[in-house]
Image (cartoon, rainbow, N blue to C red):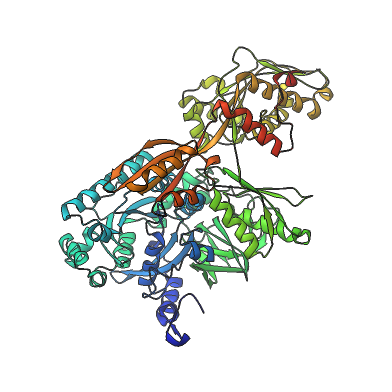
Amino acid sequence: MSRFDKPLAGGQVQRTGVYMGRKEDNIKKATEVMNILPQIRNLCIAAHIDHGKTTLSDNLIAGAGMMSSELAGSARVLDFDDQEAARGITINAASASMVHDVGGVPYLINLIDTPGHVDFGGDVTRAMRAVDGCFILACAVEGPMPQTETVVRQALKEKVKPVLFINKVDRLINELQVTPEDMMARFSETIKKVNRLIKQFAPDEFKKSWQVSVADGTVAFGSAYHNWGITVPYMAKSGISFTDIFAYCKDENQEELATKAPVHEVLLDMAVSKLPGPQEAQPYRIPNIWNGDIDSPIGKAMVNCDPDAELAMMITKIWMDPHAGEVAVGRLYSGSISQGETVYAIGAAKPERVQQVSMMVGGDRITVSKVVAGNIAAVTGIRSAAAGITLSRNKDFIPFEPIRHYSDPVVTVAVEPRSMKDLPKFIDALRSLAKADASLQITTDQETGEALLAGMGELHLEITVYRIEEEQNIKVKVSPPIVVYREGIEGSNRGHPFEGKSPNRHNRFFFEIEALSEEVVAALRAGDLGDGPVRPNDAKETGNKFGELGMDRDLMRKIYAINGTNVLVNDTKGIQGLHETRELIIEAFKEVCTKGPVAEEPVQGMFVRLTDAKLHEDAIHRGPAQTIPAVRNGIKGAMLRARTVILEPMQKAFVSVPNDWLGQVTREVTNRRGIIEDMPSDGEVTTVVGVLPIAETFGFSNDIRAASQGRAIWNTENLGFQILPPQLFDKVVAEIRTRKGLKPEPNSIGYYSE
């Protein structure tokens, strides 16, 4: 039985509206409207976990005739993954296309429902690249929460215009028994908080114009579960007032309210009138996501969303179809893509043939012959495609900017197949997972078949292992979770450069190291300063950007390379032959950034200056075998002299619990090296706000549940890295090194000067 079939008494099945003619009519209309650019809207729904995104998506899709209205709010049509259905959360960003008429004009709405759980934030970031507008959901009872801030920031970083929907208004009235005045005050506070976020994170040119307001119709109120919504423009159109809404909810008559102000009509009207179409959005979005020449023919084509120009498509999602294999979903910014043509996944060696082109409706793909610019499409047959990859017919096309994720993987598990006969299948499954989820880092030992999966949290890795076992039918052994630490610099060896010698003793490199400021690290993490080796022609411009962040402009114009949040600068003068070793110096720097001197963990926030060098006059004596070890030892020794620290990933936890169980919950937090920052109280419920090391959070869910007898509600957000307490340094370093097969104690500073 399909999940859209409705069971009846006696085991019979009634076919619901999903299979009725209206859906087919809408699909037909959608394929016609998809070629009319002013009548297209690409948008997503984003919010904190459990604020009602998927329920709202159901109702929008049902209202557009793409599923049965009886099942809206419970079918969770966009949660087509069985783990999503089982856990009641969204894991994948799923898309659906629907048609909505405004004033007799049909509009194609390409909608993406995104996850709210912090472990799947990468899917939200990737979804934002594909859309031009965003519904930010906020719960009327809880207001904007930590993940709300994250999704607003992600939207504004991609220049995606937000509007606000305040959901679960009925709970305010019926559960909290608020007065109309209290309700308006809560709405006002939520709107202020969201506008504060927009003012903080929006590009300068939109800080004012993108502020949301009740008066101009960019704020809606309603209940996705009970299928009603309202905006000021819809009030004027329907004659319904806030007083009426209060009365309908108070009298438990929300069904009638849903017929007078259906949420799909209110919000899709809002999407059409208040959110930009591709022709309006691409002129300001393309310069933000593409580094090529905007005045070139292809630059102008993308700005104008020209369907007849060269193909420019960015893949934002890969998912596995059991029948068709890998399906690549992405946004077309110019040109068109057709079944049977050959295209390049930029960076791949050869073109590949498009087997199928489709529109997406949850788990269904509706095959069409061609999709044009301004739309979100699904294609099969492009094996080289991955999330973040650009598709074009021109193999020399400048790809779109990489999608920057806000969190790094912080938890790792080792996974290997139980049976060696499954090894080839296992490696294929890992390759597909890596392409589908850019937030997942996978390293494989080809001999043993063991793979290290690094993800955003326990749940992220649980779901990944489930997909290997159940979807790929490969039984695996999984290690307990391991925390990914970082190495960083606390001090400096300025004035005392460390000397690294080559094995033949004919080449010497001198390094000074210090920590970069938090502001510079944030800019590096956001991708504002670039990544990789810096070409000499670009060094001046890059140096100027660092100068704007308070660093020495002249010094930074000598920059050699950026690796993640680490920077290498050549601060030498007149060293003969040094330019010939440039690539080797950068390679050694990259190696150190990957494996630091203390625990061979990745390094972050490090500023490396090459202050002097003595090189053998004969190039044959300063090749890779001499230069790379000398530079590597020089940087590692300088790090130890500057004082290297271990940085551990941290998480902020928000635990709301009835006051009777407050003591047990605070004890759970403090027993895990947690620091309680705040304990705001709201009647009989107190929220414990604490900061915990991720290393101490394994099993936290079960323990909190037990401590509160299941009455606590909690959520978390990642906080980045903080310095590990000194008293734990030796213990943690020894554990990491032993796990990696190294001797427990790190090398001393003398080791690197030998």
The residue positioned 53% from the left and 51% from the top of the image is 298
**How many numbered marks, from 0 up?**
0
Is 682 left or right of 455, judged from the image as shown?
A: left
Indicate the quadrant where residue 277 lies.
bottom left
Q: Please tell me which residue lies in front, 182 or 515.
A: 182
Residue 31 % position (x, y): 46, 72
The residue positioned 70% from the left and 27% from the top of the image is 746
The residue positioned 53% from the left and 63% from the top of the image is 83
Farthest top residue?
Answer: 495
Q: Please tell me which residue lies in front, 41 or 225.
A: 225
Q: Please tell me which residue lies in front, 646 or 270.
A: 646
Residue 401 % position (x, y): 54, 45
Is 141 left or right of 543, judged from the image as shown?
A: left
Query: In this rendering, is residue 633 above or below 411?
Result: above
Q: Please tell me which residue lies in front, 212 or 711.
A: 711
Query: In this rendering, is residue 447 above or below 53?
Result: above
Indicate the quadrant where residue 58 lies.
bottom left
Quadrant of image for the C terminus: top right
Indicate the quadrant where residue 632 lies.
top right
Residue 45 % position (x, y): 40, 57
Residue 728 can be seen in this image: yes
Residue 254 % position (x, y): 25, 69
Residue 301 can be seen in this image: no
